[in-house]
Amino acid sequence: MMSIDSTLSILQEHQLLVVVLEPEPGFAFKHALTWEAAYQSLLMSKRQEIHRQVAECYEALFEGRLEEFAAHLAWHYSAAGDAAMTVNYATMAGEAALRRSAHQEALASYEQALESVRSGAADNQQLTRIFIGRGRALELAAQHEAAMRNYEEMARLGNERQDPALKLSALLAQATLYSVPSTVYRPEEGLALAQEASYLARELGDHRAESHALWILSLLEGFSGSGERSIEYGETSLALARQYDYRDQAAFTLNNLSTSYMSAGDLENAGRSLEEAAALWRELGNLPMLTDTLTNFSIYYFALGDTERSLKSAEEAQQISLSIGNLWGQAYGRFILSHALGELGEWGQALRKAEECLELANQAGFVPPQCIVRAQMASIYADQGAIEHALGLANAAREVAQRLYPKWQAYAAAVVARVQLAAGEVDRAAVTINEAVASLKPGDPLAAVTEVSIRLIEALISIACRDYARVGSACDSLKRFRDGGARSYLADEMLMRGLAASAMKDLDTARRYLEAAQAEAQSNMSRRILWRILLALADLEVDAGRPLEAEAIRQQAAEHVGFIADHIQDDERRRSFLSQDLVRQALNPQSSR
């Protein structure tokens, strides 16, 4: 009998086999047809025996590296007709691919596992791992409807097998998916499923599932506008997760609690929650959720008025999201990057990031940017004097909110009012802002952006309507944010108060507010508003009979206007910005006020 070495040498000489070095040194057929002919010539029983021998050889040679070769092992055991071992290794391969963010590879492995599962070759614990992993891969691949069908199949199996634990896992997965703002966002159904899951978890004494259900309820309450209940559910979930050391669930809950705290104006607790969540995600190696927390950190820093750290955190989130192909994370990060760049007066970059955000959000099935980012873009275009374009975006944002995300209808309406004011339609703007304020509900997780913007737009329109008492009440309504440490909006608030005081000829009060506004804008690096504040201060110097001081201040305003103009990348938009009366006043001291 010829030795294996001799046989391999002959096959190489006849160019049927070639040496390969990756992933491990060995041999491969030079042509696929040769392999197919040799493979099909074997009897089924012989083929299965060889596949099993190869699989067992892998297990012996790579005992400490089985996860690395799990996909190979699953294939060999499948070909050997061993359904149980196929499920084991296909599940292992799916989980390994998911950790690498190789979503399509993970899906292929989970599908292989499910083929064997449907023949009855898995226990309920394995079923849970397979369906949850497959659903997560589908979610990360932006296939939300397919993910929901996956969880529904899981629930049916739980009922068929009369396994309450399997059913509970399916309920939690469905409720979670219904509770986040994707294309399958259905908060009423999510609430019903979460409540059912919470009851079943307590009945089974499953503390992990109970903590998970409470986290979902916290999410839903936060998005529905009940900040207090959101925090209550979240803190109860966190207490359970900490008691039983469920570190992954603690991280999910902390991440959500941070937005609930920000909505309530409690930035101190928001910051602590984010610190702990980020540390846990890094420890657990969950990069998609780390990017989510880092972007929430960016919003937190923005609310604090720390634009530099806001940008740094958003950029770190972007780098990670890009490295793992996380479209949702890329879209979310660009949302806050656009906002921060807009504050810096880098409007060309801000609009580019906003457009990229919309495209990525559409691919990822991430709904909120379709409203809030369009509204942000409308505000920038209105500041540039591109009124028609701004109004189109603002109305589009309002339509999306009405159709898909009612929570932000007030914000979108307020931006429409702002554009109407920029167009000189004061009466229409007053009607629209009244509609926005009437529909405003507390509890938006992005209240540090949305609710604050609504009240500042209300104050701006009230100045145009000479309703100075309302300016004060609109600004006063932001007290909870101010008390909680938020500073990003203070320059705008102080400007509104200063302009109102100036209009009422209370010049000392006006100066005090405007100087405070200047300090805040400089601290936040907010060129967007700083030049307007400086122009208002220059007007006060004129009223005080100090033309030289007025000219020096106006010169500072002109420098900021020049920077903004230089960072508008569209020539037509730059011209429309420079042709606005207030801008011309900053650039030309002889312009009338």
Image (cartoon, helix red, strand yellow):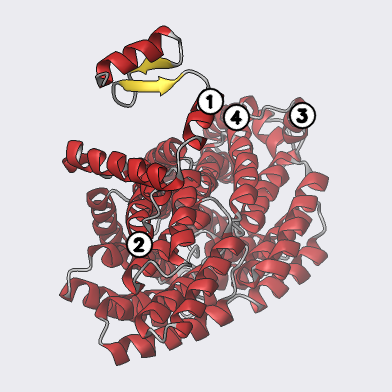
Residue 446 visible in the picture: yes
Residue 331 x/y as whole percent: 54, 47
Relative placement, left or right, of 354 versus 296 is right
Nearest the camera: 300 or 139? Answer: 139
Amino acid, disc 4: Ala
Tell which residue pokes out farthest to the front in this image. 1
Disc 1 crowd rating (10 Å Cα; few below 14, some 14-19, many 20+) is few
Relative placement, left or right, of 240 versus 171 is left
- Disc assigned to residue 575: 3
Q: Where on the picture, by quarter, is residue 274?
A: bottom left
Discs 1, 4 touching: Cβ within 8 Å? no
**Measured Cα–Cα span from mark 4 to mark 2:** 42 Å
Depth-wise, is mark 4 or mark 2 nearer the camera? 2
Amino acid, disc 2: Asn
- Disc assigned to residue 255: 2
Residue 84 x/y as whole percent: 34, 61
**Measured Cα–Cα span from mark 1 to mark 2:** 50 Å
Disc 4 crowd rating (10 Å Cα; few below 14, some 14-19, many 20+) is many
Nearest the camera: 109 or 172? Answer: 109
The tag earlier along the polypeptide, 1 or 2, is 1
Q: Residue at x 36, y 67 (%)?
A: 122
Q: Residue at x 69, y 29 (%)?
A: 588
The residue wearing badge 4 is 558
Total count of labels: 4
The residue wearing badge 1 is 32
Amino acid, disc 3: Arg
